[in-house]
Image (tube, rainbow, N blue to C red):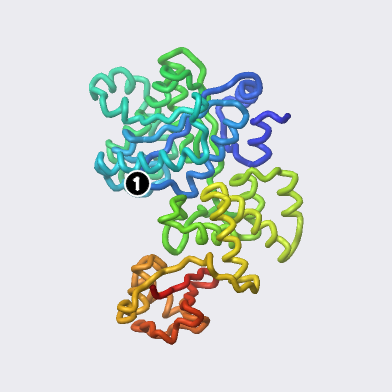
Amino acid sequence: MASVYDVLVERGYIKQLTHEDEIKELLEKEKVTFYIGFDPTADSLHVGHFIAMMFMAHMQKAGHRPIALLGGGTAMIGDPSGKTDMRKMMTKETIDHNVSCIKKQMEKFIDFSEDKAILANNGDWLLKLNYVDFIRDIGVHFSVNKMLTAECFKQRLEKGLSFLEFNYMLMQGYDFLVLNQKYGCTMQLGGDDQWSNMIAGADLIRRKEQKQAYAMTCTLLTNSEGKKMGKTENGALWLDAEKTTPYEFYQYWRNVGDADVEKCLKLLTFVPVVDINSLCSVEGSAINEAKKVLAYEVTKLIHGEEEATKAKEAAEALFGGGVDLSNVPTVTISKGDLDKTLLDILVEGKVIPSKGEGRRLIQQNGLSLNDEKVTEISKSLTEEDFKDGYALIKRGKKNYHKIVIE
C-alpha cells in the first residue's frame, strides 16, 4: 500500500514543505497529529476550503489524526494573506455564529468520533491572552525584519498594513505552539498562501520547546490560467445548499475547462488515479464524460448521493434531450406576484443577485424565458408564460430555473 505522502504527491496536493525526507519518513512510520486552520469569515465554507478538507481526509484515511482549528480568535483580526485590503471587522457574535455553522459542515468530511479527530477553536486561548505577557513571551521570538520579507506582508506594504494585521502571524504561530503542547501536534497543513505563517509557527515551537515541527502546503485551487476557481455569477461557490444549490454546484463542475478536469478529479474526489488517467486520456468532446464524473463525485461528497443524482438527472433532462424537469431548481410564486417585474421575481427567488445584474444580462442577451430572449427590463410574467405548469428561465448559456405558481 502506498504511503499517504506518495498519494498526496501523485494527486498533486503538495506544493511546499519544510523537511521533505523527514516528513516522508514520519508519515510512513508514525501516526502524526496535524492541523489545518479555518477562519470563520462567513457562515459557510466555500470550495476553496474544500481542497484543504480533502487534504485532511486523505491524511485521516491513512491513520493520521487531524485537528480542524476554527479561528474564533484570529477572525477578530483577519488574515492579510492574499488580500489587497484589510478584511471587514466582524463582531464576536457573528464569528460565533459562523463557527457553529462551519462545525456542522466539517462533520460531513472528517470523522471526529473516538478521538480520531479534534475540533478546536483558537478563541478558547487567544481571547484570554494578556497582551503584555504575550508580547514578552511570544513576540520576542519574531524578527520584524524577517516578517517584512514574508509574501503575505510584502504585497500589502505599498497600500498599507495595519499593526492589527501584523499581529496575525504571531497569533497563528502561537496556535501551532498551543496545539503542540495540548495535543502533541507536530505538523501544520494549509493552502500555499499560508506558507510564511506556517514556517513561523514551526520555528516558534523549535525555539520554545526545542522540538522539531513541520509544515506542508497544498496547491491552491486555480485553473489552467492561474486564476482562482470557485467564482460564479452569484459570488463564491459555497458548500451550503442554501447559498449555492446542489444543481448550481453540479453545473459549475460540469462546465469546467477541459484543461482543468484532470486536476480537479485528483484534488476534489477519491476516484482512483488510474481511472482518472483513463477518463482524461481522450481528445475533443469525449472529455465530457470525465466532466460528468467530476460533477457527480464532487456534488456527492458535498451534498450526498441523493442530491447529486437529482442534479445529474436535471442536467441530463435539460441538455441531454430528456423530459423530466422535476429536479431543476424551482422558484415558487403566487398569482399576486404576476404584478411584479420578472427581474423582481428573479432577485427575490435568488436566481440573480441583483436587479443591476439582471439588467446587464438582458442588455447582453443573456436572459431567456421559455427559450425566447428577454429584451425588456420591465418585462412581467403572464399566465400564458406557464406552459406545462411552469415558466423556464435560462441565465447565461447553461443555468436554468423553473418558475411555478402555487
Q: Quadrant of residue 29?
A: top right
In the image, farthest residue toward the bottom: 384
Q: Quadrant of the C terminus?
A: bottom left
Side of 172 relative to 112 (left or right): left
Vertical relation: 44 (above or below) 29: below
Q: Quadrant of the N terminus?
A: top right
Side of 328 relative to 260 (left or right): left
Question: Around disc 1, counting alpha carbons within 10 Å, would you say few (fewer than 14), some (14 to 19), or many (20 or more)?
Answer: few
Q: Residue at x 63, y 72 (%)?
A: 322
**Picture coordinates of residue 75, whole percent (x, y):** 33, 38
Compare residues 204 and 239 and report the one nearer the observer: 239
Vertical relation: 12 (above or below) 279: above
Vertical relation: 174 (above or below) 58: above
Number of residue marks? 1
Q: Residue at x 36, y 75 (%)?
A: 343
Q: Residue at x 36, y 31 (%)?
A: 121
User: What residue is disc 1 on?
Assistant: 158
**Amino acid at pointer 1:** Glu
Q: Residue at x 53, y 65 (%)?
A: 327
Compare residues 309 and 100 and report the one nearer the observer: 309
Q: Judging from the image, what secondary structure is the residue with disc 1 in? A: loop
Q: Quadrant of residue 355?
A: bottom left
